[in-house]
Image (cartoon, helix red, strand yellow):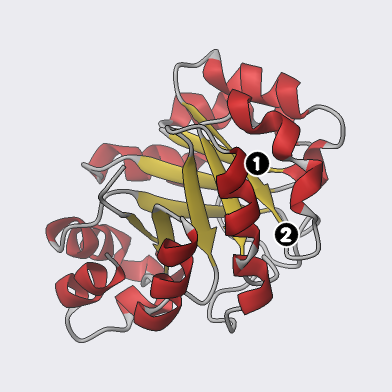
């Protein structure tokens, strides 16, 4: 996978003008659209749910990369899949011993399955699941809020995952991504980057997206 998949996070968009801001990143060359779903329990913030994802699906022309930062994700796989998610990523820390079951459930809807890990989670815990997954999402900030500073020690997890990854595994990174931290992540082996503020607060969104590649 030579091209870096850039997935702008709508957490940094203007929610009063969401369609406009989705079109901005689409027209600027974004590959996916990253949608953070937070429940106020698994992370200390509440964002959006199934109805908003369903509405976004009606206007977006690029895949919806839906990141579930929620407790008991297995309860919400079907609703989000039916709402139009193309990739559903759930957290290892919320799945407990049901990673394989949730992964199989996501695949049953014909979409990609991703597994995310928080900064304090050791990569050794998730290596055994890599062959079942389409994507691993390495968080380089504590999940819950946008605009946090990149944690370089978390990016080193990419190296460990890369050693055990299949050729088709997407290694995505989310948290404090800009033109400088993107280079660190891609040099380690990441092939998908999530960026919110860096893209949406740029004076030239197309240039910002290109700089991440």
Instruction: State which quarter of the image contains the C terminus.
Output: bottom left
Where residue 118 is drawn, which disc sits there? Answer: 2
Q: Is residue 97 above or below residue 49?
A: above
Which residue lies under the disc numbered 1? 90
- x 75%, y 60%: residue: 40
Which one is in front in this view, the residue at disc 1 or the one at disc 2? Answer: 2
- x 20%, y 74%: residue: 205
- x 23%, y 62%: residue: 25
Between 103 and 127, the one lying in front of the other is 127
Q: Is residue 69 above or below residue 51?
A: below
Instruction: State which quarter of the image contains the N terminus.
Output: top left
| Residue 139, x across and y down, in percent | 62, 62
- Judge whether residue 71 can be spotted in this image: no
| Residue 33, x across and y down, in percent | 35, 51
Q: Is residue 22 above or below residue 207?
A: above
State the SS at label 1.
strand
Q: Is residue 151 above or below residue 126?
A: below
- Judge whether residue 118 can be spotted in this image: yes
Between 90 and 78, the one lying in front of the other is 90
């Amino acid at each position: 996978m030579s091209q870096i998949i850039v997935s702008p996070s709508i957490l940094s968009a203007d929610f009063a003008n969401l369609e406009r801001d989705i079109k901005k990143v689409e027209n600027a060359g974004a590959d996916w659209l990253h949608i953070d779903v937070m429940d106020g329990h698994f992370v200390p913030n509440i964002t959006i749910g199934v109805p908003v994802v369903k509405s976004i699906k009606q206007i977006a022309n690029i895949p919806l990369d839906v990141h579930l930062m929620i407790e008991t994700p297995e309860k919400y796989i079907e609703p989000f899949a039916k709402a139009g998610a193309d990739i559903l990523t759930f957290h290892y820390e919320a799945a407990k011993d049901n990673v394989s079951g949730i992964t199989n459930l996501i695949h049953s809807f014909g979409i990609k399955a991703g597994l995310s890990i928080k900064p304090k989670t050791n990569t050794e815990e998730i290596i055994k699941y890599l062959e079942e997954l389409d994507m691993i999402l390495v968080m380089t900030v504590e999940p819950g809020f946008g605009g946090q500073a990149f944690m370089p020690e978390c990016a080193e997890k990419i190296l460990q995952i890369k050693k055990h990854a299949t050729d088709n595994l997407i290694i995505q990174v989310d948290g404090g991504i800009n033109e400088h931290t993107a280079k660190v992540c891609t040099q380690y082996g990441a092939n998908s980057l999530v960026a919110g503020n860096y893209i949406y607060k740029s004076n030239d969104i197309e240039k910002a997206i290109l700089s991440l590649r």
